[in-house]
Image: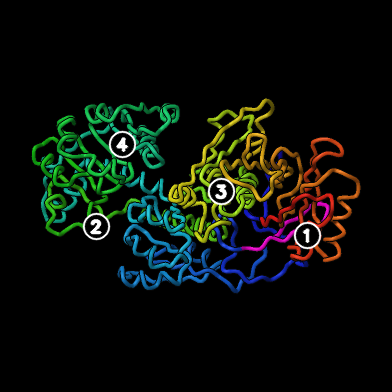
């Protein structure tokens, strides 16, 4: 099945004559809850368009210096405000006028900033990898996507790690300072060779693996510790994954490349230094907080750690009288890991593209507080993402007023093995569809799970393994709401739940089941469901009522138990019928009940 784009994900137009202007807050899609307009043109190809007025440009606040190439990308899409060195109070004041914020490592994006934004801030872009300066919990609660630039500075950081490793081993910084002071101390600065030494790479992600590749080229024996790294990826470059304690005990050199999290904060401390080989040498181009700096000074003084080469510190810049910085066996640089001309431009472009994409409503492969899905999987899942949200939106509108939705079951039918189908993104979008129509809460991909938990909504997932080709990630998605009454009785399944089911056909989401009735209607525009006695002329009668009011019918499908028995008619309409037209439909003798559902 072809996984083509849907209008709520991508923006497209085949010809200028189909253009139309519409004023919205932002040009975006339902994926992030920002309003957009979807128009369906009648044609054999069922082309879809999202159109918007370019005079409603979003505003992006760039709070730290960004490469010119990135700024140019931003300016093509948004109004860009470059305001550097803002105080926290100034940032809180400005942020209510901004749709996006871009920072590096020097700006703290705190809960107060999200609260001050008044809900307008939709995306924070971190120009770099680490996001410990952004309050992710607050961002998620406020529905703000956080994206970073994890790849552009990978090589630069790895190169700097290797530069510090070799400079430390040969006392380059100390010898340079000595010569410039008029001294010639060749015997004092005798170094150690790297060939044959064991390097423990702590954190085997993008930077860690690149450091490992380069260290192997220097003739070092490389081991690594990372509880999340696949062993086959490590073996592919000749690296053995070992336990944390084994890495500490075996290493002649240790290079740190883990993020700063509660689990890694001060992971190198008095206790862990005591487990290391005497005379170990440590490089840190990750985050300063992963080392207990006072404990490192003690380990240096005791000779447990022979040398340390540090690019990052707990407080940046560190105090001028820092014992660590002043220690003769410490080589220090001022957070230069990503500071190459090429990396700076690359990071600027990467974060600008991520921010612009997020403001357009595109799903981001670099999001750090939303379901993390690789870019190639995002492309494949796009039409299923639309299907998931619309099934949730349709199902909850079938619930009778006063019924509290607390228990939802989602079933995925797929020919793929469970490990090959990541449903987190689909679940988040079903949650968005379920909650948004019945609340005033802003729901998006970021805060969907958080909001569901906050509202006591329990979503259970089930996967049915189907026979056949696994070419399509999902054959069908079924949403069931239990323990509620329905405003459309025919939507109740034999087991007593509201049930809707859908599939993607030729890249377009379709509703294929309501209750126990098989239907087939494209999930575009809005839908009228009619429960009726199956008899000739029903399609014509309903169509005539809608036609008299100039309401265009896009699709019509009838599902029945048996000829002349109970049936459900599903009608797709491009415009909302008037209350009078809906009343006339309900007065047709064979129609027992009907419901209008806005998608």
The numbered mark at residue 429 is: 3
Magenta run includes residue 41: yes
What is the crowding at mark 4: few (fewer than 14 residues within 10 Å), some, or many (at least 20)?
many
For marks 1 and 4, give the one nearer the viewer. Answer: 1
Nearer-the-camera pick, 165 or 414: 414
Q: Earlier in the sequence, mark 4 or mark 3?
A: 4
What is the crowding at mark 3: few (fewer than 14 residues within 10 Å), some, or many (at least 20)?
many
Q: Earlier in the sequence, mark 1 or mark 2?
A: 1
Q: Distance between the residues labelled 3 and 2?
A: 40 Å
Give above or below for 223 relative to 566.
above
Label 2: which secondary element: loop
The numbered mark at residue 202 is: 4
Q: How far apart are marks 2 and 4 (CA)?
A: 22 Å
Label 1: which secondary element: loop
Q: Position of residue 99 (x, y in %)?
A: 48, 66
User: Marks 2 and 3: in contact by CB < 8 Å?
Assistant: no
Q: How far apart are marks 1 and 2 (CA)?
A: 56 Å
Q: Name the residue under label 2.
A: 316
Label 4: which secondary element: strand
Q: Earlier in the sequence, mark 1 or mark 3?
A: 1
Residue at 58% x, 43% y: name it. Answer: 481
Locate the C terminus and report the quarter of the image it occupies. bottom right
Q: Mark 1 points at which residue?
A: 41
Q: Earlier in the sequence, mark 1 or mark 4?
A: 1
The residue stretch that appears in magenta: 36-49
Q: Earlier in the sequence, mark 3 or mark 2?
A: 2
For marks 1 and 3, give the one nearer the viewer. Answer: 3
Does residue 522 appear to the left or right of 547 in the view shown?
left
Q: Distance between the residues labelled 4 and 3?
A: 36 Å
Nearer-the-camera pick, 259 or 198: 259
């Amino acid at each position: 099945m072809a996984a083509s784009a849907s209008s709520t994900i991508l923006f497209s137009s085949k010809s200028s004559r189909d253009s139309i202007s519409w004023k919205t807050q932002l040009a975006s899609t339902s994926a992030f809850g920002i309003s957009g307009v979807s128009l369906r043109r009648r044609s054999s190809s069922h082309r879809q368009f999202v159109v918007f007025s370019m005079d409603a440009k979003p505003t992006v606040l760039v709070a730290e210096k960004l490469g010119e190439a990135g700024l140019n990308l931003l300016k093509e899409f948004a109004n860009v405000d470059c305001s550097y060195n803002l105080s926290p109070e100034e940032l809180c004041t400005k942020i209510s006028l901004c749709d996006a914020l871009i920072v590096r490592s020097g700006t703290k994006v705190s809960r107060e900033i999200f609260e001050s934004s008044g809900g307008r801030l939709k995306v924070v872009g971190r120009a770099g990898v680490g996001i410990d300066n952004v309050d992710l919990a607050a961002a998620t609660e406020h529905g703000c996507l956080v994206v970073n630039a994890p790849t552009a500075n990978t090589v630069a950081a790895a190169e700097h790690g290797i530069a510090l490793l070799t400079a430390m081993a040969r006392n380059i910084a100390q010898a340079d300072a000595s010569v410039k002071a008029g001294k010639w101390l060749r015997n004092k600065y005798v170094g150690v060779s790297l060939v044959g030494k064991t390097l423990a790479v702590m954190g085997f992600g993008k930077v860690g693996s690149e450091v490992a590749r380069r260290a192997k080229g220097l003739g070092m024996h490389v081991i690594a510790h990372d509880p999340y790294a696949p062993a086959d990826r490590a073996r592919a470059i000749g690296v053995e994954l070992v336990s944390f304690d084994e890495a500490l005990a075996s290493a002649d050199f240790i290079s740190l490349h883990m993020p700063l999290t509660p689990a890694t904060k001060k992971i190198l401390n008095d206790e862990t230094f005591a487990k290391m080989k005497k005379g170990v040498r440590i490089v840190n181009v990750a985050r300063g907080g992963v080392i207990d700096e006072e404990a490192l000074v003690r380990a240096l003084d005791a000779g447990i750690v022979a040398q340390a080469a540090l690019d990052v510190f707990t407080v940046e810049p560190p105090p001028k009288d820092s014992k660590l910085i002043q220690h003769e066996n410490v080589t220090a640089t001022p957070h230069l890991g990503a500071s190459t001309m090429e990396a700076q431009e690359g990071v600027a472009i990467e974060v600008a593209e991520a921010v612009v994409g997020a403001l357009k409503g595109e799903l981001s492969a670099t999001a750090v507080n939303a379901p993390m899905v690789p870019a190639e999987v995002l492309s494949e899942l796009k039409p299923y993402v639309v299907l998931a949200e619309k099934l949730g939106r349709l199902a909850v509108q079938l619930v009778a007023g006063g019924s509290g939705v607390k228990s939802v079951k989602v079933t995925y039918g797929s020919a793929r093995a469970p490990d090959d189908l990541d449903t987190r993104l689909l679940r988040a979008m079903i949650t968005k569809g379920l909650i948004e129509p019945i609340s005033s809460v802003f729901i998006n991909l970021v805060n969907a799970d958080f909001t569901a938990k906050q509202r006591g909504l329990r979503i259970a997932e089930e996967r049915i393994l189907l026979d056949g080709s696994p070419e399509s990630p999902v054959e069908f998605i079924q949403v069931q709401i239990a323990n509620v009454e329905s405003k459309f009785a025919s939507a109740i399944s034999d087991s007593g739940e509201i049930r809707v089911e859908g599939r993607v056909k030729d890249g377009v989401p379709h509703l294929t089941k309501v209750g126990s009735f098989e239907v087939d209607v494209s999930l575009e525009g809005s839908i009228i469901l009619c429960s009726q006695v199956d008899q000739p002329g029903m399609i014509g009668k309903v169509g005539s009522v809608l036609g008299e009011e100039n309401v265009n019918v896009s699709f019509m499908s009838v599902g029945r138990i048996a000829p002349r028995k109970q049936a459900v008619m599903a009608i797709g309409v491009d415009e909302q019928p008037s209350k009078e037209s809906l009343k006339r439909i309900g007065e047709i003798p064979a129609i027992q009940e009907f419901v209008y559902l806005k998608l």
